[in-house]
Amino acid sequence: MGLFPGSIKQSILRATLAVLFSAMPSTLAAESATEPPSAHIPASHLNAYSNLAVEWMQGYLQTDTTNPPGNEMRAIRFLKKILDEEGIENRVFEYLPGRGDLWARLPHTTAESKRPIILLNHMDVVTSDASHWKVSPFSGEVKDGYIWGRGAQDMKDEGIAQLVAMVMLKREKVLLDRDVIFLAVSDEEADGTGTDWFIAHQRPLLENAEFLINEGGDNPLENGKVKYVGVDVGEKTTFWLHVVAHGRAGHGSRPNPDSAPNRLVHALDRIIAYRTPLRVLPVVDEFMRDMAPNEPPDLAVAYRNVNKALEDKKFQARIEQDESLNFLLRDTITLTMLGGSEQTNVIPAEAWANLDVRILPGGHPEELLAALRKVVDDPNVSIEPLNKQFRIANYSPTDTILFAAIQKVTASYFPGAPVVPYITSGYDENQRYRPLGINSYGFNPYTATEEEGNTEHGDNERIRLEEVRRGPRVMFDVVTDVAAAE
């Protein structure tokens, strides 16, 4: 605390999306208009922040918050200690034994303020099998140029970037025209009780925020170059289904063509073969048009007018075979679980399966359910929702100053990489905050190769050391561009 004296004199002229520094001569300000705010922080300070990011990342990864059961209060104690030492206002809410949320705030320093920006992250991580890892999942070990540990990609890495950005704002005495809120929640990987509890019981602490940055962004690194900066502006929503087939029970030695397992197999065969209608959301149309310049000539033409291209059956088939595009253009249905008899020689009276269904924003679950029942067309097979509550998918616009800030800042770090709006295949908690009037985006300050990204929820999860050192600076620049006083 107080390690770095001095302050940054910043002025953000958002109308032209240029960073100007009022303490500088006008000619120098013009020359540095495209430089991110951190470019004017002394190199020794930046190096110290990078060192802190590595140190804190290791300590955070060593904090086991596997969900279930979560035990996120362990992470809260780790984070709170740092916030206390830095003199950053914070509050802890333990809503269940061992589970809680952590709220911290840097208040605006101007007489009048704009609506706050929230830096949201979750503290829990998914399970891991240490026998399949090269190092302990909770070692935080530095090895082969990586920091290893469960949560290195999802999402303790982004939590540390947000934390270090908060510390940079505080130590560098950045003048703010809006509050910057740090919110670490529990249970995102399971039921989302941390976010739900906070919204239900501490909504005033969200202060009618205007913006929120969360996980969900994607910056794929191919051949040493960032292909694009993907900003999550919307997510598909889950609509899990339970399929149950009924039939005559009996002995396995006497085959029964109308058995429950047989009926289930026939039903699932029809479901798997079914293709939901293709639908081009405006945000997906924008994404594909932005990606067109990076594609081969034949695809570039299709990407520039995807609605027209989808009239071509060959292009449709090409889309369906591309896992990275298929989910963007339709509701998807994936078979994930099966069950029947507990003995090989017993024909059960019931056999069941679970389907992971993801619906695009604007989609209607009742229509999809009716379509699947019609496709199966068997009175002895029932299909019912597993969700206790269906959350209608939503997304945020791209014509905001936060999206513009991401475009400007990332252009400095990843030259030539287009910033594209993105719909993610999975669900994240942005969906819970948008109905409150908060423009919520998934933005990742880190890049990852396909191999590195695939370690998320997988074995040997890790992040490159160089990314840990740089990522907080990227996050700082985006937040400063939005929140620094004019």
Image: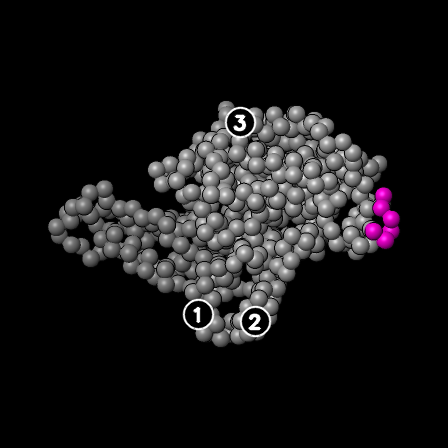
Based on the displayed image, in which of its 4 quarters is residue 176 positioned?
Answer: top right
Give coordinates of residue 474: x percent, y percent.
Answer: 65, 46
Residue denoted by label 1: 317
Instruction: Bin the neighbour count of mark 1 within 10 Å (Cα to Cα): few under 14, some 14-19, many 20 and up.
Output: few
Instruction: Bin the neighbour count of mark 3 within 10 Å (Cα to Cα): few under 14, some 14-19, many 20 and up.
Output: many
| Mark 2 or 1, nearer chain start | 2
Front-lying residue, 177 or 384: 177
Give coordinates of residue 98: x percent, y percent.
Answer: 50, 25
Instruction: Label 3: state its secondary structure.
Output: helix
| Mark 3 or 1, nearer chain start | 3
In the rendered view, would you say 367 is above or below 387?
A: below
Horizontal relation, residue 247 to residue 79: left or right: left
In the rendered view, would you say 441 is above or below 275?
A: above
The amino acid type, in three-letter code, at marker 2 is Ala
Residue 258 seen by the camera: yes
Q: Magenta segment range?
A: 23-28
User: How many marks do you count on the picture?
Assistant: 3
Task: Name the residue at 28% across, 56% down.
Answer: 265
Front-lying residue, 35 or 11: 35
Q: Could you give the CA–CA distance between mark 2 and mark 1, rounded to whole angstroms?
A: 17 Å
Q: Are marks 2 and 1 in contact (CB under 8 Å)?
A: no
Residue 175 is one of the magenta-drawn residues: no
Mark number, residue 300: 2
Task: Name the residue at 78% across, 53% down.
Answer: 33
Mark number, residue 73: 3
Q: Could you give the CA–CA distance between mark 2 and mark 3, rounded to whole angstroms?
A: 49 Å
The amino acid type, in three-letter code, at marker 1 is Ala
